Image: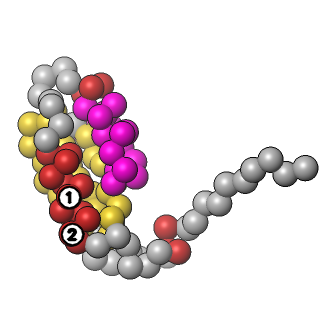
Amino acid sequence: MIVGYTVLLRPDAQPNEIHAWMSIAVDGNETRAVIASLLGEPGVAGIHDTNGRWDLLASLRAANLSELSSVLERVRLIKGIQSTETSIHLQTYRG
């Protein structure tokens, strides 16, 4: 008996989806709280700890630019986020 199943689509299975990176600077020691808030945001596909100018790197996904704009607005309102910079993926190259 099959109780359930999960389907995982390749990222290129939705070719018109908007993909973006958001670099995030976090206030003081708020990193854990910011990560917890980001994990609850449906537009955030992944979060990465990093070094250098930015504290976190978030992978964003949206169906269109309007939806991406809403994701950016919600993320920027998260307590503990000092500043952000977002870059939209224009083209992906594979070897």
Residue at left 67%, top 54%? 6
**Amino acid on which disc 1 is placed:** Ser
- Asked if residue 31 can be seen in this view, the reply is yes
Which residue is under mark 2? 66
Q: Are marks 1 and 2 in contact (CB under 8 Å)?
A: yes
Q: How many other residues sit within 10 Å of disc 1, few (<14), some (14-19) or many (≥20)?
A: few
- Colouring of the image: secondary structure
- Left or right position of 5 against 59: right
Q: Which residues are magenta?
A: 34-53
Residue at left 24%, top 55%? 71
- The kind of secondary structure element at disc 1 is helix
Q: Residue 31 sits in which quadrant?
A: top left
Residue at left 14%, top 45%? 76
Which residue is under mark 1? 70
Magenta-span inclusion, residue 17: no
Say if 85 sits above or below 13 in the image.
above
- Left or right position of 21 against 69: right
Q: Report x, y in % for residue 83.
A: 9, 43
- The kind of secondary structure element at disc 2 is helix
Q: Report x, y in % for residue 19.
A: 33, 66
**Amino acid on which disc 2 is placed:** Ser
Q: Residue furthest right?
A: 1
Q: Report x, y in % for residue 33.
A: 27, 26
